[in-house]
Image: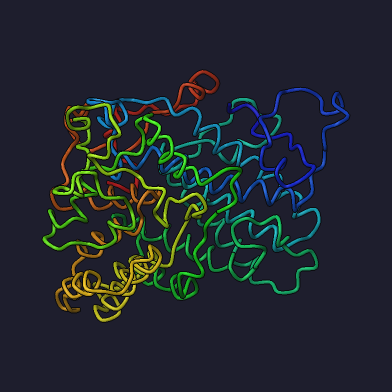
Amino acid sequence: MLKNYKYILLIAVLFVVMQSCKKDYFDLSENPNQVTTPSLASLLSTATHKTGINNFNVGSITSNYVQYTANPSAAAASDIYQEVDQSGTWDALYYAMADISDMKRLAIQQGSSEYLGVANVLLAYHLNLVNDLWGSAPFSDAFNSATLIPKYDTQEDLYKTSNALLDSAIAQLAITTATLKLSTTNDVIHKGVRTAWLKTAYALKARNLIKVSKTTLYNAAAVLSAIDNSYTSNADDAGMASFFLRNPWATVAVNNAGNTLGGWLSEQLVDHLNGTTYGVFDPRIRKITDPTAVAAIPWIGTVNGAGNRPPGANTSKDENYIAISSPWTSNTAPILIVTYAELKFIEAEAALPTNPARAYSAYLAGINANMDKLQVPAGAERTAYIAVASVGAASLTRALILKEKYVATYLNPEAWNDARRFDYAYKDFTLPVNAALPAFIRRLSYPSVERSENGSNIPNISSQSERLWWDK
């Protein structure tokens, strides 16, 4: 709902904080058991936890569009670009931003530069998720309790707001003398380490700046400057690994084994890795999925829009699925928000036109960092793959960089931004079978919850093939 994006937080212990629920519109004084003024620490745990979960929520949508995953049912709406009502994700993003806005206000009241910096990082992250899915959306007017039908900010303004939030975060997180420091136990992303959050602010800034590569706003030098202040190894990665039961991607894998038919890997991703598309076997496939039960065909994906192969509607291991055995999607694997490997590919793309040597070094570092993250062992397969990838600085292309970044951002929402910037130009990348649009999908339609409560402010869009402002 758009009316008043706020939560009533039930705060007794961290577990309860993470289960905070939607606000009903009644006077808080009616319930003497409600905590009316949550602490900064409790808000931090809620905000950081929801950031990871919302990465999963959005990734569950976008992974079909970039063909990491596919639906086993032929002509499924999620595969063929039919409109799907994403009200749940819309609400989840705005409820999270309401909590983060509360944390920001309280941080200002209590004079905590560290909490204020983190709040701005998380607001920028969520705002980007909304903007990248739907374009124009409420923000500047959204968290005012007196406003029931908030106005829409333009796509460009939301982008500028996100950058401003990150710049403010960087300034606040650079302060070393905060008297009220981040809670180490309530921060489920960076364990209260200020310098880690500062690096993540720069990482998200670099991601923001590369996203406008098609526009006149693009500044490669600014991208590289942000990179220089960001991550230096996989140890810096921003990930959330605090779950009530397990990583939700692992739940997808468990449910798949229970025949609920989720988590099927796309033929596009599998062929990207198994040697079919590029002529070289990528050992990362062994760390992303399990081999099929068919010894002669261990790696085979589902064609988007076509459904799984005969006999159909099965999980008999005759195709590849999201795997609970993977370091990326196991029970305890963190949901990765932004990684060192991704940043090395951003660096490579930004540096390529003017400094091919730097670009090539970053490109190779990104491949190795992602292989290390996936726990690919040293050996013949890894050596052979790196040998083929080692094309030399003079032969490095943007297509090769984005080919590798496609693997490194597996299941991450950011992959859809790259696909759109790249005009879906990955080798052999085709429209889904039975596609409902004549071209690749570029945006989502506004959800029903928003149309019913704030419909008068929703911009008109022609179709889901309409490009966002940075994608033109």
User: Is residue 157 at least partly visible in the picture?
Assistant: no
Residue 321 falls left or right of residue 391? right
Query: What is the total number of numbered labels drawn onto the structure image?
Result: 0
Q: Residue 69: x percent and y percent?
A: 30, 41
Q: Residue 199: x percent and y percent?
A: 54, 68
Q: What residue occupies the far top of the structure in this picture?
A: 452
**As displayed, is residue 223 above or below residue 422?**
below
**Residue closest to the eye, 440 or 327:** 327
User: Is residue 236 at least partly visible in the picture?
Assistant: yes
**As displayed, is residue 114 above or below residue 231?**
above
Q: State the residue at coordinates (19%, 37%).
A: 303
**Colouring mode (rainbow / by chain / secondary structure / one colour):** rainbow
Q: State the residue at coordinates (46%, 50%).
A: 159
Instruction: Examine the image and state in which quarter residue 343 appears.
Output: bottom left
**Residue closest to the eye, 147 or 361:** 361
Q: State the residue at coordinates (48%, 60%).
A: 204
Instruction: Examine the image and state in which quarter residue 224 appears.
Output: bottom left
**As displayed, is residue 400 above or below residue 215?**
below
In which quadrant of the rendered image does the N terminus lie?
top right
**Residue closest to the eye, 435 or 437:** 435
Q: What residue occupies the far bottom of the structure in this picture?
A: 357
Q: State the residue at coordinates (14%, 74%).
A: 395
**Residue closest to the eye, 371 or 8:** 371
Residue 429 falls left or right of residue 289? left
Residue 141 falls left or right of residue 333? right
**As displayed, is residue 236 above or below residue 444?**
below
Q: Residue 21: x percent and y percent?
A: 67, 32
Q: Residue 86: x percent and y percent?
A: 44, 29
